[in-house]
Amino acid sequence: MAWSYPKGLKVAELGPDIFQFTILDSKHKERIIEGGPWIIDNQILVLRKWKVGIEEDEDVFSLAPVWVQVWNLPIHCLSKAVGKKVGTIFDEVKDVLIPQTGGKEGKHMKLLVLVDIKQPLLRGTTVRINGMNKWLSFKYEKCPDFCYSCGVIGHSEKNCKSPVLVQKGQY
């Protein structure tokens, strides 16, 4: 689906990496703010409703929507309810999708979650199913400039200033 700019869109630069978008049509405004994730020039665009002083608040733009694939769940656990429960390790679960076809990689679920992009992305989590611990691995979809060394969005591995050394057997 092609996306077109909303009629009357105005953009003002407020500071380094901070822009104010003015959209007159409230229907378009809500669709854009609640939509996403938005990727522009391989960077994640974090949108928030305007409030006075927003450009001074460093943390207001740290939560961003990201699609996360959850792998290794037993087939009987692929449900929206389980997805919401697994998603509690993130800041918020906005949506849960269960793909109808497994494809060549197998069955998984997708979570649209809010993540703190200043923190390393989680590689997975352990859950207890039928009295047994099970490792669920996460794959992040269309993640822009993601550092595989420290796990943070916003730079690549070659530009990492704080690489994390992972020992064999660690996640």
Image: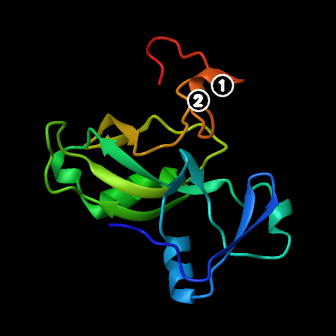
Left or right of residue 3: residue 91: right
Instruction: Mark 2: give few (<14), some (14-19) or many (20+) Cα within 10 Å.
Output: some
User: In terms of secondary structure, where does tag 2 sit?
Assistant: loop
Seen at 42% across and 58% down, the residue is: 112
Seen at 39% across and 39% down, the residue is: 138
Left or right of residue 42: residue 128: left
Q: Nearer the viewer, residue 156 or 62?
A: 156
Q: Nearer the viewer, residue 4 or 83?
A: 4
Q: Are marks 1 and 2 in contact (CB under 8 Å)?
A: yes
For residue 19, above or below residue 66: below
Amino acid type of disc 2? Answer: Ser
Position of residue 63 measured from the top left corner of the image (x, y, whole percent): 62, 56
Position of residue 3 measured from the top left corner of the image (x, y, whole percent): 42, 69
Q: Nearer the viewer, residue 21 or 169?
A: 21
Position of residue 62 measured from the top left corner of the image (x, y, whole percent): 67, 53
Seen at 39% across and 65% down, the residue is: 95
Left or right of residue 165: residue 87: left
For residue 59, above or below residue 47: above
Disc 1 target residue: 159
Position of residue 60 measured from the top left corner of the image (x, y, whole percent): 73, 61
Seen at 34% across and 61% down, the residue is: 96
Disc 2 target residue: 156
Total count of labels: 2
Left or right of residue 137: residue 47: right
User: In terms of secondary structure, where does tag 1 sit?
Assistant: helix
Amino acid type of disc 1? Answer: Asn
